[in-house]
Image (cartoon, rainbow, N blue to C red):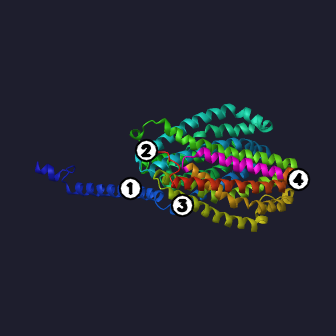
Amino acid sequence: MKILLYNSKISFLNPKYLYTTLAYANIKIAYARMINMKKNSNIELVTGNPKKAINKLAWPLIASMFLIFLNNIIDSIWVAGLGAEPLAAIGYVTPLFMVLIGFGNGIGAGANSLISRYIGAEKKDGANNAAIHSAILSIFVSITLTIIFLITLEPLLKIMGASSVLKYAMDYGIVVFSLTFAVLLPPIFGGAFRAEGDIKRATIPIALAAIINMILDPIFIYTFNWGVAGAALATGLGPFISLLLMFYWIFIKKDTYLSYNRKDFHNDMSMYKDILIVGIPASLEQLIMAALAVVVNFMLTIVSGSLAVAVYTAGWRIISLGLLPAIGVGTAAITVAGVAYGAKKYENIRIATRYSVKLGLISSIIVCIILYLFATQIAFIFSYSESSSHLEPLIASFIQLMCLFILYVPFGASAGNVLQGLGKGTTSFILTIIREFVLVLLFAYILGFVFNLGEYGIYYGMLIGGSIGSAIAYTYIEIYINRLIKGKIKPKEI
């Protein structure tokens, strides 16, 4: 017996085995401690100082948004090499694709809001359950939207006027919408990662998707000679690979703060409702912006013709790029405001709101100055050919004027995002309609048509309407938070 105990290679008393076992155990303990420290640091980030949390959360978001924007431009450049018809075909599919992106971002915002509130209330089980509910909801929505888009794609494209390029549009659209789940799920899981303060895992997959798409585009389009279908496949495979990375972190590595285990799930219909109360209005806000662009294009066509539309289309792409810092800061405020609301630290909501406006405004001023000073050089990007050289001074003038639009976006965007964090998605949506649709279009019509100021009247009207709308939104959130602090508003229990 002693011989077996002391000499057997498999004996627990064998010195070599004992040393190896202890070393392995120590490694596991050290790894577990490291993971716990990471989890704790992430939670401390979102539950601690609101200003530090927004700083940490915002900049990676802005960087990933910039990559997505850059990817869209490069995507168009590669497809343009196929000719005018394929490029036009993708232009018809893009609004429908943006609806899909809007659903993903919207439900992601809803998941972010609900999970953040549970984390703030220190209800880990509730946060886990909310995360699982958001995952189930995302799968259901992705299946539903896939069926809807594939069935209605052809008639929708015909209604939109794509009959002349229908084959190209269908080739692109069928592939893209068959991969709806790959496009929809990453931003939803990303919302859960943002809620727990794990900003790297919320943004790395988004950036990775954009980079993969940029790499695969020329390979699929030209090397494999798949044309627009290749561009669509690249668009879907990028987020699909990112989704696999997220699944690895969640289900294999299992080192996330939130748990997606079956034992953590307790079906609660009110959770789906809470996610959708924020998610649906947030999704519809994307539609409002798309509708605004359509109406502005129509108004410009009436007062100045297609030339003004070309100037607006090119110039607005640059203005949209300038909006990214304010949008990124506002998105970070969803998590911080949600956590503070769940923890009933209402003063932190005020701090987060004001700081996100301040940080967004400083960033927007810097961007506006850069755009104003280098407007001519930037305009050259869209007017380098002989046939389009006459657009350069017009686009430069547009950028110099409309860069002012960037300055008041932090007020409206931060107010709307904070309201989403508090679970007030419908209120945020109403304020967006008032700001971006009613007031902008009203003043654009008055100055452009009633006062007969042409396209510049429309631009001035957009600036005036947007600024008034942003002031209304920010005033509303300040009053709401003040009433919340004073106890005049009863917060919703979670």
Does label 2 or label 3 sit earlier along the sequence?
A: 2
Does label 1 or label 3 sit earlier along the sequence?
A: 1
Identity of the residue drawn at 58% across and 56% down: 61
Q: Is there CB contact under 8 Å for labels 2 and 4?
A: no
Distance from disc 3 to disc 4, alpha carbons, whole Å, reads 44 Å
Provide the residue designation for mark 4: 452
Does label 1 or label 2 sit earlier along the sequence?
A: 1
Provide the residue designation for mark 1: 36
Name the disc covering residue 232, or none. Answer: none
For label 2, count other residues whose C-alpha is less than 10 Å away and answer few (under 14), some (14-19) or many (20+).
many
Provide the residue designation for mark 2: 126
Q: Is there CB contact under 8 Å for labels 3 and 4?
A: no
- State the SS at label 1: helix
Q: What amino acid type should be assigned to the residue bearing mark 4? A: Asn
Which label sits in the foreground, 1 or 2?
2
Q: Check if residue 433 falls in the magenta segment.
A: yes
Does label 2 or label 4 sit earlier along the sequence?
A: 2
Say which quarter of the image contains residue 34: bottom left
For label 3, count other residues whose C-alpha is less than 10 Å away and answer few (under 14), some (14-19) or many (20+).
some
- State the SS at label 2: helix
Distance from disc 2 to disc 3, alpha carbons, whole Å, reads 26 Å
Q: What segment carries the magenta color?
A: 421-446
For label 1, count other residues whose C-alpha is less than 10 Å away and answer few (under 14), some (14-19) or many (20+).
some
